[in-house]
Amino acid sequence: MSVFEAVADPVRRDLLAVLREYGPASLNTLAEGRPMTRQAVTKHLNVLVKCGLVRAHRRGRERIHELDPEPLKELADFLAPYAAAWDDRLDRLQTYLEENP
Amino acid sequence: MSVFEAVADPVRRDLLAVLREYGPASLNTLAEGRPMTRQAVTKHLNVLVKCGLVRAHRRGRERIHELDPEPLKELADFLAPYAAAWDDRLDRLQTYLEENP
DNA sequence: TTGACATGCAACCTTGAGGTTGCTTATTGT
DNA sequence: ACAATAAGCAACCTCAAGGTTGCATGTCAA
């Protein structure tokens, strides 16, 4: 599954945001307070793991999930050619990405 | 449908790229050479129209489609908080977006 | 006006994403 | 040892996204 599809789901975007703001977290922590089952959250996390946005490792009986934003560069690559149309200031992003293929 | 979902499909990403590179185009032009029906392409274009990424108007018996990249800013808004993790040079993007809510 | 062209409309099919339930396994603390 | 806790596994359900076919509509050109 591509990064684009991974990020298309609002639940997964929120999971990424939580990991970014609060750092690594266990499955139970990430599932708490959500209007869905723990199993559903597991599936979302597995999607994120498969496309490299989340790294998971077991610590005792817990499974710790950690954010890896690197694959989001693919999103930036896609975005860059359009960015110039909004605002010239964003040309810096485009320039950067062209210089780092 | 959200911009995230709109951009999740590779066919739609390609349609956007074609419109960006070659400018406005008719349905037939956009459907030519694709491994799917004209009707399928119509559906994809309608998705893009509904979320504001494409503007369509009729000219004679043709329907001309034009790119409007503005809604892609939502993607950049999402991306910005993660961008800092890659490279400090991308902080400019983040700064810009924070200054333009 | 009449045929060819560009598109619209509507019904239909198939598949996988997102979710659930129920049960099993592994680890921890007392 | 054993009960509670954290997670994994597998089967199942539902629905909409992506695609198709067939026909209708509107427009141009000779």
Image (spheres, coloured by chain):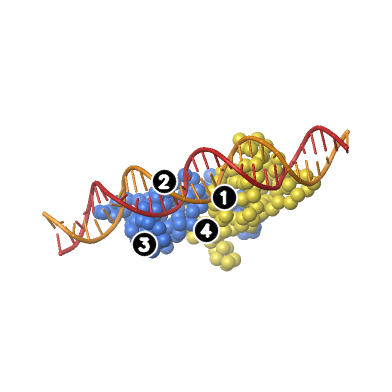
Chain colours: A blue, B yellow, C red, D orange
Count neighbours of disc 3 (C-alpha within 10 A) and say few if under 14, some if 14 to 19, many if 20 or more: few
Subunit bearing disc 3: A
Mark 3 vs mark 1, CA separation in Å: 30 Å
- Residue A47 vs A89, above or below: the answer is above
Circle 4 SS class: helix
Residue B35 location in percent, x, y? Answer: 61, 35
Tags 3 and 2 on a common chain: yes
Mark 3 vs mark 2, CA separation in Å: 22 Å
Residue B18 location in percent, x, y? Answer: 65, 44
- State the residue at coordinates (54%, 48%): B8
Mark 1 vs mark 4, CA separation in Å: 14 Å
Observer-side mark, 3 or 1, equals 3
State the residue position of label 1: B7
Q: Earlier in the sequence, mark 3 or mark 2?
A: 3
Tags 2 and 1 on a common chain: no
Mark 3 vs mark 4, CA separation in Å: 23 Å
Tags 3 and 4 on a common chain: no
Mark 4 vs mark 2, CA separation in Å: 20 Å
Identify the amino acid type marked 3.
Glu
State the residue position of label 4: B78
Residue A16 location in percent, x, y? Answer: 44, 57
Is residue A91 among what the camera can see?
no
Q: Earlier in the sequence, mark 1 or mark 4?
A: 1
- Residue D4 vs B63, above or below: the answer is below
- State the residue at coordinates (75%, 49%): B58
Identify the amino acid type marked 2.
Lys
Tags 4 and 2 on a common chain: no
Of residues B42 and D23, which is closer to you in this image? D23
